[in-house]
Amino acid sequence: MATPQKEIEVDPVFLEKPDEETYDSCAGYDTSTASLTSSINEFVYQHGRRYHTYYGDDKNYLPVDETEQDRLDLHHEVFLGLLDQDLHKAPIDENPQKILDVGTGTGIWAVDIAEKYPSAEVIGTDLTPIQPAWVPPNCKFEIDDAEQEWTYASNSFDLIHMRNLIQGIRDWDKVLKDAYRCTKPGGWIELQEISGHLRCDDGTMKEDNPIKVFLDNLAKAMEKSGRPPAANGAQMKKDLEKAGFVDVQVHIARQPLGPWPKEPTLKQIGAMMLLSSETMFSAYGMVPFTRILGMTEDEASHVCEAAKRGVKNKNYHTYSHYYVVYGRKPE
Ligand SMILES: C[S@@+](CC[C@H](N)C(=O)[O-])C[C@H]1O[C@@H](n2cnc3c(N)ncnc32)[C@H](O)[C@@H]1O
């Protein structure tokens, strides 16, 4: 596994004791976001957010409203930054014929990959219809639950991509078995996930760090609901190998929380995460904390708000691993 060895160097500005403890806004840091409309018609409102219930209310714990769609599109920019603007790491053919993006969200990756590979028919699937109508002619979207039997032809995809989906799936073995069947011999699967384990190279993270407290609670809730507690590169590799994929590689990038790194790309990614954290913690936390862990709305909100303040705290130099795990179906 290619684990980055060097510590992330902290921008010296963040090493002096700052006058004010928190970033008061994202002004001055380079960020980008996009806004989309949606056509959701089966939903409930909870915690001031809109959730989709077509496949049941215990499928996707994340909201699906415009705020969440903006967050997903912003996170797409983060993922691109983490991969040097690459959409994937798997060494697929130059002229792929078929690509599948499972749990496509707003479809932003599917649209980008369709533009990158005009030779390919790209299909993006999701539980919820929040994808745009105007897309490249070689891209289409389908509403589907990845945990149900896949209806795609065997041996048909050059690349199957699943990003940031870890907690949407209970039975990964079953999903990867379907994915293996539908991948072309010689074709690739690629999983991209953020670790739930908070890291820090300079001792500025203590046990009671509020972001860590948030992540520990989320892992507890996910485990209780029968989902993987958090992404883990070594486990993802094992899962792909168990499904039959070979030549499995694990690439690890680092996603800083806040613009504290000195290196400009990491600083920009950290700034985007600072902006994302405005809604990210409540998006991930409110339903699992109240419904699964039994917290009151106030208690859950307190954990989410504390984590948000944790990202704003200039004195915490924390980051997460971002795992890109890809493997090939043997000829
Ligand atoms: C955090 S979002 C990531 C979206 C997209 N992959 C990206 O990286 O921008 C997770 C998405 O997975 C979808 N999802 C969760 N469980 C799913 C399932 N069982 N089948 C299909 N999609 C699912 C959700 O509806 C949501 O849009």
Image (cartoon, rainbow, N blue to C red):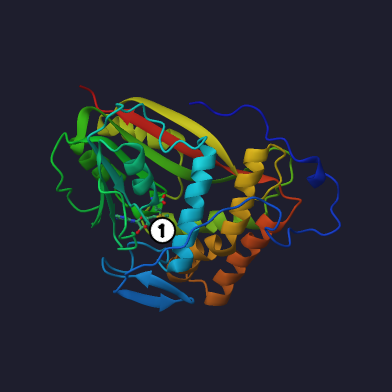
Q: Position of residue 121 (x, y in %)?
A: 23, 42
Q: Dot 1, how many residues are within 10 Å of its Cα: few (below 14), some (14-19), or many (20+)? A: some
Q: How many marks?
A: 1
Tell me what residue is drawn at x 14 percent, y 48 percent: 151
Q: Is mark 1 within 8 Å of ligand 1?
A: no
The image quadrant in which ligand 1 is located: bottom left
At 75% across and 52% down in the image, what residue appears?
A: 314
Q: Give coordinates of residue 49: x percent, y percent.
A: 46, 73
Q: Is residue 325 left or right of residue 297?
A: left
Q: Horizontal and vertical percent for residue 242?
A: 29, 32
> Quick check: can you spot residue 219?
no
Q: Is residue 302 visible?
A: yes
Which residue type carries mark 1?
A: Lys
**Picture layout, residue 87 above or below residue 92:** below
Q: At 55% from the left edge and 64% from the top edge, which residue is drawn?
A: 279
| Residue 278 falls in image quadrant | bottom right
SS of the residue under disc 1: helix
Q: Nearer the viewer, residue 51 or 121?
A: 121
Report the front residue among 107 and 126: 107
Relative depth, front residue between 148 and 129: 129
Residue that appears at 73% across and 56% down: 313
**Is 221 located above or below residue 235 in the figure?**
below
* The C terminus sits in image quarter: top left
Q: Which residue is mark 1?
A: 224
Residue 142 spot, x, y in % from top left: 23, 56
